[in-house]
Image (tube, grey):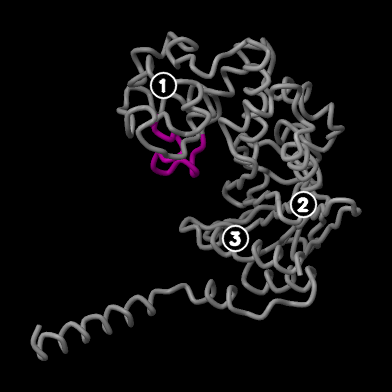
Amino acid sequence: MNKSIKRVVRALLLIGTLVSMFFVPWILVWAWILPLPATVQAQADEAIGHGLDGIILYVDKAGEPPEFYAAGWHDRENKIPANPHAFFKIASISKLYDAVAITKLVNRGYLSLDGTLADYFPELAARIEYADKISLRAMVQHRSGIPNFTDTPNFWDHPTQSYQEALDLILDKPTTFAPNHGYEYSNTNYLLISKLIEKTTGKDKFNYIAEVILDPLDLHNTFRSLADVNMDDLMGGYHVGVEEDLKATDYGSMISTAEDVGIFLRALNDGSVFDQGEREIYSSIYEYEHGGWLPGYQSHAKYIKDTDMVVVQFNNTTDAKLYYWNLTQIIFNRFVKILER
């Protein structure tokens, strides 16, 4: 390569670097590189300074009393401060509960992980591609290829209100890939899993989860839906570009406190939520931590193995480009660093 070409290449690389730097969301970089505050509460207050409306943190260090932190607003309009014991829409964190429920049904012989979608839903055999090859295991692991109904354009502006409405959004559409030939997170998998739990047990899914998970763990602040809670106790939810509080908008989410989620996560990771033989099944099909996202609500729940610590973080600010999702992941990691030092 002669010198003139090298100069052109260097110039193009410099231009590319400058352009990419121009589009960097600098607040994310700033949130990441700031010196760690001395305390968890100071980090929570700092997070509000980055634009979050409210934040809740629950910490369970093995052998120590639980810790609770909050900053920002529970109700932005009425200036009610964030409450660490508030109810919150936990969104996809509920998939952990669903996976435990499936594990128990498999262990008790009611279901098989190798059973297919066509086996369990014969009425869908001609409506979902590869129905005779998509196993229950593939659905639990998001390896089915079934399209995600919440990816439907403008879904969050007009959320479905029933199982059938949601399912209709993906029926007769091609799968994204052949079963077990890829991975794609799809809420449709867990829509079908929820219905399968009900078909198998003859009970409402939440009632079964309460019977085999919530009641044994004495979790009395976890609820099926908005209809089961005092709305004043539910943390407000705010989405960029939407003026009103979204807490009354029903997206079908389970509702819980950070403490209840943390207790469940501890039991999931130490195995106390399982009966004999179940932990091995669960370990073969799903994960031990999760996040959740709905307009106005996002959450992170994680077990830190090295320090035997559970951390649950709730944030009530979202946006369509997931800028705040990335920001809260950075903040979560900073909390963990402060807690571990």
Nearer the viewer's eye, disc 2 or disc 1? 2
Q: Amino acid at mark 2?
A: Asp
Q: Position of residue 128 (x, y in %)?
A: 36, 20
Quarter placement of the C terminus: bottom right
Q: Residue at x 39, y 42 (%)?
A: 153
Q: Taking 291 as reference, is 62 left or right? A: right
Whether residue 64 is in magenta: the answer is no
- Residue at image mark 1: 134
Above or below, comparing residue 210 to residue 116 in the picture? below
Q: Nearer the viewer, residue 333 or 152?
A: 333
Q: Nearer the viewer, residue 109 or 58?
A: 109
Q: Position of residue 182 (x, y in %)?
A: 37, 37
Q: Residue at x 59, y 23 (%)?
A: 194
Q: Are marks 2 and 3 in contact (CB under 8 Å)?
A: no
Whether residue 155 is in magenta: the answer is yes
- Residue at image mark 2: 308
Label 2: how many Cα within 10 Å (few below 14, some 14–19, many 20+): some
Quarter placement of the N terminus: bottom left
Q: Earlier in the sequence, mark 3 or mark 1?
A: 1
Q: Amino acid at mark 3?
A: Gln
Q: In the structure shown, which secondary structural element does the residue marked by tag 2 occupy?
A: loop
Q: Residue at x 71, y 36 (%)?
A: 226
- Residue interval drawn in magenta: 145-159
Q: Nearer the viewer, residue 174 or 270?
A: 270
Q: In the structure shown, which secondary structural element does the residue marked by tag 3 occupy?
A: helix
* Count of numbered badges drawn on the protein: 3
Q: In the structure shown, which secondary structural element does the residue marked by tag 1 occupy?
A: loop
Q: Amino acid at mark 1?
A: Ile
Q: Quadrant of residue 74?
A: bottom right
Q: Taking 306 as reference, is 121 left or right? A: left
Specify the principal SS of the magenta part.
loop
